Image: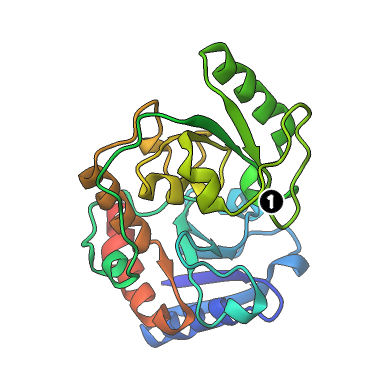
Amino acid sequence: MKIALYTKRNDFFMAMLALWLTRAGHQTTEINRDKWAGQGLDADLVFVHGIRSDIIDAHAGKPVFVVESGYFQRVNTIAEKQSGHYQISYGRLNNPPAFECPSDRFDSLGITVDKAVRKKGYALLIGQVPGDSALGGIDQTDYLLSKAAEYEATGFDVKYRPHPRGGVDLPGYPALPGSLDEALDGAGIAVMYNSTTGFEALRKGIAVDCAPCAAYYELAGEKCPVIADRKAFFARSAYGQWRIDETAQAVDFILNKWLPTL
């Protein structure tokens, strides 16, 4: 099989994927996505680091996997590149395996999931870093203000927590002080466009309102799903994220479990 990998500069994760794909007997070609000339490569399977719809469109009809920061214990800083998780997502950002997966990978993270479901509390608006690729180019200020009006009209108290690494001001809603855990502790529903905070809210038994592009959209709604449904989703998500030292297992899972389902 011919496999194209569109990489970033100094992209060790993609380099390791290429290594294990080659060792599995496939022909791999690596190309710096930022120097790409616009012509799709002759490939049966494609990996691209980051949201590049132009590259995805150039390979229409072929399976494309997108690499980005993971869902749990993700890569957020340069120091976390070795120990953190990268997501591998089919066709777009935030699209983990659609089929049932065992719970072993999620269980190994040591993350607890609250059985109880939160029934009361304020509507917590969650901001994202301006320019976050997960926003897909939308104006999050307009989105969150619209949601604030919607929840206030139904009797909710509305509070706002901007992203700590560069939030946007939300007129009329001062930023909540304290940690994310403290902000979530009083929330009855967490409202965001497409933030990984949604995973944390669901873990705590808090309902989530989000855009359809969010990975956890299937769990969104006025009521938080029961723990069995949340755990099943988290198990699938854990098979959609991998560390650099797990790339051999990632390749085996993608080629032998994920790809045949597409």
Identify which residue is drawn at 68% across, 81% down: 10
In which quadrant will I find the N terminus? bottom left
- Horizontal side of residue 198 vs 177, given as left or right: left
Q: Residues within 10 Å of mark 1 (few under 14, many from 20)?
A: few
Name the secondary structure under disc 1. loop
Residue 20's quadrant in the figure?
bottom left
- Seen from the viewer's position, the closer of residues 178 and 139 is 178
Identify which residue is drawn at 52% across, 67% down: 74
Q: Is residue 132 above or below residue 85?
A: above
Q: Position of residue 78 (x, y in %)?
A: 66, 78
Q: Is residue 91 above or below residue 123?
A: below
Q: Residue furthest top?
A: 153
- Seen from the viewer's position, the closer of residues 246 and 170 is 170
Residue 21's quadrant in the figure?
bottom left
For the residue marked with disc 1, what is the amino acid?
Asp
Identify which residue is drawn at 62% across, 60% down: 50
- Horizontal side of residue 45 vs 144, given as left or right: left
Q: Position of residue 103 (x, y in %)?
A: 23, 62
Residue position marked by numbered label 1 in the rendering? 132
- Seen from the viewer's position, the closer of residues 108 and 173 is 173
Q: Position of residue 246 (x, y in %)?
A: 40, 80
Residue 126's quadrant in the figure?
top right
Count of numbered badges drawn on the protein: 1
Color style of the picture: rainbow
Q: Is residue 12 above or below residue 138?
A: below
- The answer to whether one can see residue 15 in this image is yes
- Horizontal side of residue 124 vs 31, given as left or right: left
Identify which residue is drawn at 59% across, 54% down: 179
